């Protein structure tokens, strides 16, 4: 079970991709691990941890600190990790591991499975037959914020002041309207999802979107309800012309494994 | 749950599309089960997101000026 470690070569850790009930070795053969090598299953406690080799020269603590600040490295690592998790998600429930979870060897991975068996198993039960969908909402260009028509009174000076005030508050007002629409869309989508959460809106310079993002939602949706969920997104697009909605997915259930901290034991 | 809604066409908006890096980073950095790897213990403790955010912030700095006009028509 332990990683073969020739003392003359670099130490190699086990990078955890995710935990499943069982992993088909033939399926794992179809995807490459972090270092481009094979992906393997470590079985213990009735579960399978899917791992790949992580040479510590690149994935050890010091190296990771440095590499995680390198966007090109980060992208390659994120995509390699995701490719494995996504493959697992297509054949059944998976508890995705957070990026950069590295153990010394497979024996330690097996010990982790035994120690966390109850909560991992419970999470797999909860995720069975469900997938994650993302809905992003952007301010729609060219749709002016709805403004209440001001009472027509006073002379040209008053009209000017109203106009000026309207200009100054248009941006705040537009943001308020967009934020309210985003909250309404999220609430409606959450109502037809098993679970829902909002990620922080993405920075426009990273997303490349022409306008600001006001909703970055993730929704856990039962397989049978996916078409209805997509139809609801379309319906909400009609109902909220001030927003442009974008549906992404299916994602592995990254946003619904609730791993802020390890549960107290 | 959504039975009152008409299902969309089978090959409608649900077709697979390439995964955008920003969407992926939202998920693999900020979420995912936290299992303390014995090698990455300290990294998990000081928050992976903050470390990697430095990469994003650095690249954002190289991409352009701070995000200003949030609304269409707003001068940037």
Image (spheres, helix red, strand yellow):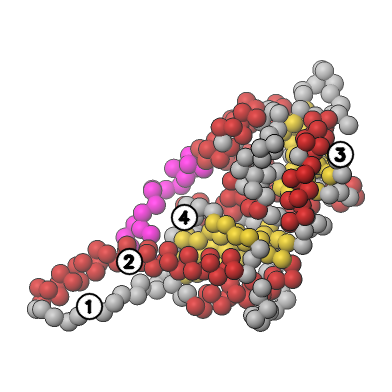
**How far apart are the alpha carbons under marks 4 and 2?**
20 Å
SS at mark 2 in the image: helix
The C terminus of chain B: image quadrant: bottom left
Tell me the residue at 51%/78% (across/down).
Answer: A238
Q: Mark 4 vs mark 2: which is more N-terminal? A: 2
Q: Nearer the viewer, residue B60 or A165?
A: A165
Residue A113: x and y in percent read 80, 38
Q: Nearer the viewer, residue B61 or A39?
A: A39
Label 4 packing within 10 angstroms: few (<14), some (14-19), many (20+): some
Q: Please give the residue where the numbered disc 3 appears in the rendered image.
A: A44
Q: Mark 3 vs mark 2: which is more N-terminal? A: 3
Q: Are marks 3 and 2 on the same chain?
A: yes
Q: Please give the residue where the numbered disc 2 appears in the rendered image.
A: A173
Q: With B54 as the anchor, is A146 left or right in this view?
A: left
Residue bounds of the magenta highlight: B56-76
**How far apart are the alpha carbons under marks 1 and 3?**
70 Å
Main secondary structure along the magenta-highlighted residues: loop
Q: Are marks 1 and 2 on the same chain?
A: yes
Mark 3 falls within which chain?
A
Q: Are marks 4 and 2 on the same chain?
A: yes
Q: Mark on residue A204? A: 4
**How far apart are the alpha carbons under marks 4 and 3?**
44 Å
Q: Are marks 1 and 2 in contact (CB under 8 Å)?
A: no
């Amino acid at each position: 079970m332990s990683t073969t470690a020739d003392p003359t070569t670099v130490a190699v850790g086990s990078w955890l991709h995710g935990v499943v009930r069982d992993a088909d070795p033939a399926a794992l053969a179809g995807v490459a691990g972090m270092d481009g090598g094979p992906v393997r299953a470590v079985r213990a406690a009735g579960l399978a941890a899917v791992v790949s080799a992580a040479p510590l020269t690149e994935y050890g603590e010091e190296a990771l600190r440095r590499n995680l600040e390198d966007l090109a490295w980060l992208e390659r690592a994120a995509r390699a990790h995701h490719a494995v998790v996504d493959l697992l998600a297509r054949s059944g429930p998976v508890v995705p591991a957070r990026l950069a979870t590295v153990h010394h060897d497979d024996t330690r991975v097996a010990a982790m499975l035994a120690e966390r068996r109850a909560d991992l198993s419970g999470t797999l039960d909860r995720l069975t037959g469900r997938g994650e969908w993302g809905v992003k909402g952007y301010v729609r260009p060219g749709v002016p914020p709805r403004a209440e028509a001001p009472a027509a009174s006073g002379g040209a000076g008053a009209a000017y002041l109203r106009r000026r005030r309207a200009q100054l508050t248009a941006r705040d007002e537009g943001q308020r309207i967009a934020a309210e629409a985003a909250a309404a869309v999220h609430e409606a989508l959450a109502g037809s999802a098993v679970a829902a959460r909002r990620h922080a809106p993405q920075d426009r310079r990273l997303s490349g979107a022409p306008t600001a993002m006001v909703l970055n939602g993730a929704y856990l949706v039962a397989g049978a309800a996916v078409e209805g969920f997509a139809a609801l997104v379309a319906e909400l697009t009609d109902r909220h012309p001030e927003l442009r909605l974008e549906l992404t997915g299916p994602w592995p259930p990254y946003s619904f494994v609730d791993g802020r901290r390890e549960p107290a034991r | 749950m959504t039975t009152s809604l008409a299902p969309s066409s089978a090959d409608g908006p649900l077709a697979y599309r390439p995964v955008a890096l920003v969407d992926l980073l939202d998920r693999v950095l900020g979420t995912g089960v936290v299992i303390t790897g014995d090698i990455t213990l300290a990294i998990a403790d000081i928050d992976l997101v903050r470390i990697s955010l430095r990469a994003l912030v650095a690249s954002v700095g190289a991409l352009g000026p701070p995000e200003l006009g949030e609304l269409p028509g707003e001068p940037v």
